[in-house]
Amino acid sequence: MNIVKRIGISALAGGAVFLALIYWYQWSASRLTDADVDDYMNRIEAQSQNPGGRHDLPALRKFLNEDDGRPIYTVNLYKFHDVADYPAALGLTGSGEEAYDRFSSVMIKLMAVRGSHPVFGSSWSDQANGDWDRIVIVRYRSRRDLVDLFATKEFAEASLHKWASIKSHDRLLVQALHLPGGEVPIFILALIVTSMAFFSSSRRCLEKQDADVC
């Protein structure tokens, strides 16, 4: 395989990865219809509220009714219990922070399949701005993706750990122009795939000891 052909195949591999990931990341959902909102709200309301969602249902419905199909960012502020507040009958233990990490391990998976991800997290904040233990900013691909996550059985069950962990919290919902997105990491990953494909094909050529072809 000559070098031009190898470069071409490698570039196609990297380009395919780039386009697939960009589609996954920037996929634009259609706006939620009234029927969509009713369906999601019915599913969420049917969840057990102990340990279920504990959503502010009127506020959630208003948020969904105002959907514009664009990405949404949540700015989350958390103060944790020193000892997780689990129901005694469950026999679960740990600090509030450990309980929240159990919830986060489920959330990361649910977000990833919906083109969503954290963009910032910190365990430090200026005491003058509130006594918060953790600040997390999360990018959701759309309001549809966010409520679809809320409506899952996995989220409802993982909420046990969330509410056991949190002593107090606050949240802002924003649409940002300058928070970092995932396009640059996706482009870098595509370049890595291109390079790996090129060097892999080069190695195979050298292993065959056919330098004239390679």
Image (cartoon, rainbow, N blue to C red):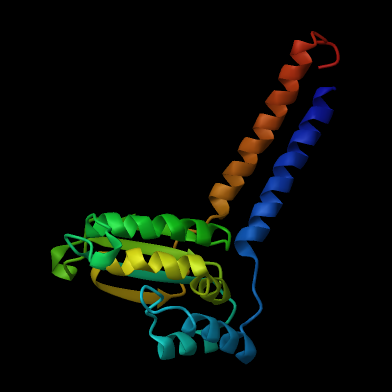
Give the residue furthest to the top.
209
- Total number of numbered discs in the rendering: 0
Q: Is residue 68 above or below residue 8?
A: below
> Left or right: 35 with respect to 124?
right
Residue pictured at 80% horizontal, 24% vertical: 3
Residue pictured at 29% horizontal, 75% vertical: 170
Across and down, in percent, residue 72 comes to 49, 72
Across and down, in percent, residue 188 comes to 58, 43
Residue pictured at 57% horizontal, 86% vertical: 37
Residue pictured at 53% horizontal, 89% vertical: 65
Give the residue furthest to the front.
89
Image quarter (top left, top right, bottom left or bottom right) of the C terminus: top right
Indicate the quadrant where residue 211 lies: top right
Q: Is residue 6 above or below residue 89?
A: above
Residue 61 seen by the camera: yes
> Left or right: 71 with respect to 158?
right
Q: Is residue 186 above or below residue 176?
A: above
Q: Nearer the viewer, residue 68 or 176?
A: 68
Residue 178 seen by the camera: no
Q: Nearer the viewer, residue 135 or 39?
A: 39
Indicate the quadrant where residue 22 lies: bottom right
Q: Is residue 66 above or below residue 149?
A: below
